[in-house]
Image (cartoon, rainbow, N blue to C red):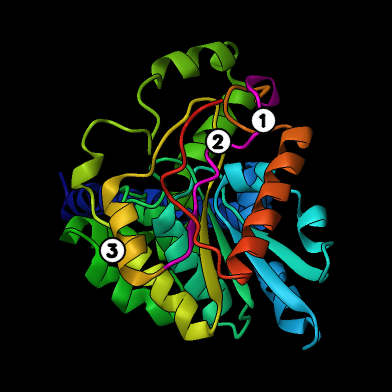
Amino acid sequence: MTEETTNANTVSPARDEWKVLFVLAISLLLMEGLVRCFAGSLSIDLRNTIATPQTSERIARAPGNVRTILVVGNSLARRGVDTALLGGGEHPAEVEVFAPDGSSVAQWDWGVKRYFANAGAHPDMILVMTGRTHLLDIPASPETLGAYFVGAQDLGAALRSMPDGESSLRLLLGAGSHLLANRDRVRTRIGYSFMPGFETAWPELTAGKEPGQPDGREQAVGTESLRRLVSTARSMGSDLRVFSVPLPEPYRLPQPVLGFLSETGTPYADLSVVPGITPEHFPDGYHLDEDGAKIFTRAILDSLRRQSTGEKLSGDAPHDR
């Protein structure tokens, strides 16, 4: 065997490896570009989140004599609050919604900083709509936080808030790669589109406890994200108020949340039970229908009127239907 043949045999595999890595890198970059361009088609939730800069711009452009209200929450807020009714009261207001599906106070905290506080879009009032556990420090995907909620100005603070080095790295990776942040959505979309039987098999494979649901340990979970959110609202000069959203079953906010709201003097109205809202107003067993949303929104308006007159509101409303 000649020396030339030996060299060819040793160099060729290395070249092939580089070719594979190059093709892989190009494929990942292509997929990254596709996810960034067509992310809205992956889910309605993502479409709503991506549209948040436009929400921010509408608040920033509102005339000075028009009161601006930002409704913050998740799907409970987006489907439970009638924005036309809320903004069309005695004093008309510009009402906008920041309510990513499946989110809780961790996403709301960083999202309000990124899209509103840092963008100079400071609403006059922020109405936070919560279910039982959404104001607790429920763990959130660091990749998703990095991609869609933490802005460049807050990246350092967000990294310091992560519980460990792995979470910090995942946050950084999510900030750089929307493909990574949406890997589950991409996988699900490909499955539904190209894999026969995926629609019935995937829910069974991923069945389990839904993130954010009570698990008996909520009394030990902190409220640091809520503390930051309240601080951000006050730094913007926004009047932040908290409302419990009606659900099919009565509930109370966890004691750490109630204690924090009382300690900081944050207005809170327990609307987890509203007269006139019955189980029939929850067609999917969780979200209010249009009629239920109107009843709930009227209760919000009534609560705001009573708060403006200085009437004390109780966070310990009886849970009777």
Element type where label 1 sits in the image? loop
Please report the residue visible at 59 percent of the width from the left and 22 percent of the height from the top. Answer: 285
Q: CA distance from mark 3 to mark 1?
A: 33 Å
Q: Nearer the viewer, residue 155 or 195?
A: 155
In the rendered image, which quarter contains the C terminus? top right
Residue at the disc numbered 2 = 273
Residue 110 picture location, percent across and down: 44, 67
> Crowdedness of circle 2 by 10 Å Cα count: few (<14), some, many (20+)?
many
Quarter of the image for residue 166 reads bottom left
Is 135 displayed left or right of 164 in the figure?
right
Please report the residue visible at 39 percent of the width from the left and 39 percent of the height from the top. Answer: 252
Kindly identify the amino acid type of the residue bearing the numbered disc 2.
Val
Check if mark 1's residue and mark 2's residue have beta carbons within 8 Å: yes
Residue at the disc numbered 1 = 277
Please report the residue visible at 26 percent of the width from the left and 61 percent of the height from the top. Answer: 169
Q: Nearer the viewer, residue 122 or 299?
A: 299
**Mark closer to the observer (3, 2):** 2
Please report the residue visible at 47 percent of the width from the left and 31 percent of the height from the top. Answer: 319
Please tell me whether the stretch drawn in magenta is mainly helix, strand or loop.
loop
Residue 268 inside the magenta-drawn segment = yes
> Is residue 67 visible from the viewing direction of this image?
yes
Q: CA distance from mark 1 to mark 2?
A: 8 Å
Kindly identify the amino acid type of the residue bearing the numbered disc 3.
Glu
Quarter of the image for residue 219 reads top left
Residue 81 picture location, percent across and down: 69, 48
Kindly identify the amino acid type of the residue bearing the numbered disc 1.
Ile
Element type where label 3 sits in the image? helix
Q: Earlier in the sequence, mark 3 or mark 2?
A: 3
Element type where label 2 sits in the image? loop
Residue at the disc numbered 3 = 224
Magenta extent: 266-281
Is 263 displayed left or right of 265 in the figure?
left
